[in-house]
Amino acid sequence: MKPAMKAFLLFCLFVTTLHASGEPLNVLFIVSEDNGPEIGCYGAPVKTPNLDNLAKEGTLFRNAYVAQAGCSQSRAAFLTGLYPHQNGQIGLATWKYAMFSEKIPNVVKTLGKAGYRTGNIGKLHVNPEKAFPFDFKAIPSANFSRKGMSGYAENAKKFIKSSKRPFYLQINHPDAHRPFLKTVDGLPAKPLTGRDVDALPFMGINHPELRQQSADYYNCMMRLDSYIGDLLRVLAESGKAKNTVVVYIGDHGADVMRGKRTSYEGGVRIPMIIRWPGGKSGQDRKELVSTLDLFPTFCEIAGVKPPASLPGRSLRPLVAGESTKWRRYLFTEFHLHSNHNPWPQRTVRDDRYKLIFNPLAGEVNPGYAFTMGKKFFNAPEDELLAIAGKEVREAYQLMKKPPRYELYDLQADPYEFRNLADGPDHAKIRDRLIAKLEDWQEETGDALRDPTVARRLFDLIIKAGTGKRKALNYSFMTKETK
């Protein structure tokens, strides 16, 4: 049998299996806050039985990424299927940053028009909120104090059981956002301490204080797993699990050094697990996937055509276990989070190497002082760095004042401590990735392909200052990206 015919028959079998009940598929989309793949099934030293079992029943994506390592920016990206430079949400919604237009197509509008009930539990954190006309909303606050956590599952039960129409339900959990609370609702039952674990490895510093913070971060992850277990039980008890695609992601990496608000792997690489009725179970896929792939995936689930402008593609073939040609290069970016940390960046990676482009090379990155100077650590910076090795100390100095290009071998150096960009042995790899990055900037209408735009963006934010949260005008970017 010819490969093309075999692939077609597999697709037909997959679709037939998905719709064997004659009912359309629902979507339960679970988003956790500020955590990378620090989950048991990804190899982390933490007990997460519910997520581990979800991976056994579905597909774990080993190399999944967000478009930008920030809350609003990441959420706007997966809801619109567009990079932040395309949809305009380049900074936090709480700092009055917003998408260019409420008319940009998004998941909620598209599935709503297809006849789906749409619900959102937990914070949305994207401007303007009216661009996302959910039919049902509950617990709209960030809820970083983790009050009334049983309400997430209770509201999910209410929404799921309220109608026989197909649904899209997005649930946004506050764990593992700071503060890293050791226990909430008696969870976890046996919290970890700094004596039980090492500090998160991508920080490169195993200081006692960082070990305790890492332990409490892991405690957040174990608690999150319990709450996700509650959601999955609600779904099972509703009788709709057999017709529901469950998608779990983190919105970006942990809020620690070299994590959130950076373009390093600790910031942009996330967990992604999908359980799709009729899909292949127990998969561990290594393809480069992005949260930008979720909008076209949801469109395929709903049987509607995705907007032609989307750079992502449906993940269905991978979930089905197919051997399919996939992307060779994956891109992420950064602009700012709050006005404390403007630092325009663009990145590209292939199956082994990653390039980071810093248009403002030679400047001091404000994001470095913001993270190192926040009241997260009692130990001063000098004390933290003093126990690190020479290679790690040099990596922190590079992060503080980055060069134009950073190049990392993620196979040999997964935590990005050794910059290879200036070495002659890697010149061809560097130049190849630079060319791919520039092509992508051209294809996606990235205003930062003009280096003066990065400077104008930086200067405008610095001038606006951090004393007052107010809307800023980035019309010079919209000319390139609308």
Image (cartoon, rainbow, N blue to C red):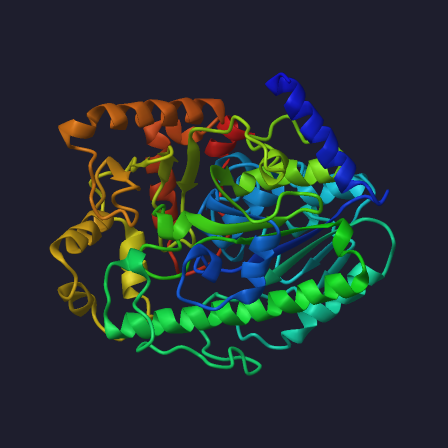
Between 206 and 4, the one nearer to me in the picture = 4
Horizontal side, residue 141 vs residue 165: left or right: left
Number of numbered labels in the structure image: 0
Q: Does residue 143 lie above or below 313 as drawn?
A: below
Horizontal side, residue 431 vs residue 298: left or right: left
Q: Position of residue 249 (x, y in %)?
A: 55, 53
Q: Position of residue 166 (x, y in %)?
A: 81, 48
Question: Where, by quadrant of the figure, is residue 135 drawn?
Answer: bottom right
Residue at the front extreme, as displayed: 1
Q: Does residue 44 lie above or below 98 as drawn?
A: below
Image quadrant holding the N terminus, namely top right
Between 401 and 212, the one nearer to me in the picture = 212
Between 273 and 73, the one nearer to me in the picture = 273
Q: For the point 80% across and 62% down, which residue is it? A: 238
Between 347 and 329, the one nearer to me in the picture = 329
Q: Does residue 423 lie above or below 362 as drawn?
A: above
Q: For the point 30% across and 59% down, which residue is it? A: 201
Residue at the top extreme, as displayed: 2
Image quadrant holding the C terminus, namely top right
Question: Where, by quadrant of the figure, is residue 368 drawn?
Answer: bottom left
**Residue 178, visible in the rendered structure:** yes
**Residue 125, visible in the rendered structure:** no
Q: For the point 20% across and 67% down, which residue is it? A: 384
Horizontal side, residue 61 vs residue 193: left or right: right
Q: Position of residue 157 (x, y in %)?
A: 77, 66
Q: Position of residue 44 (x, y in %)?
A: 40, 61
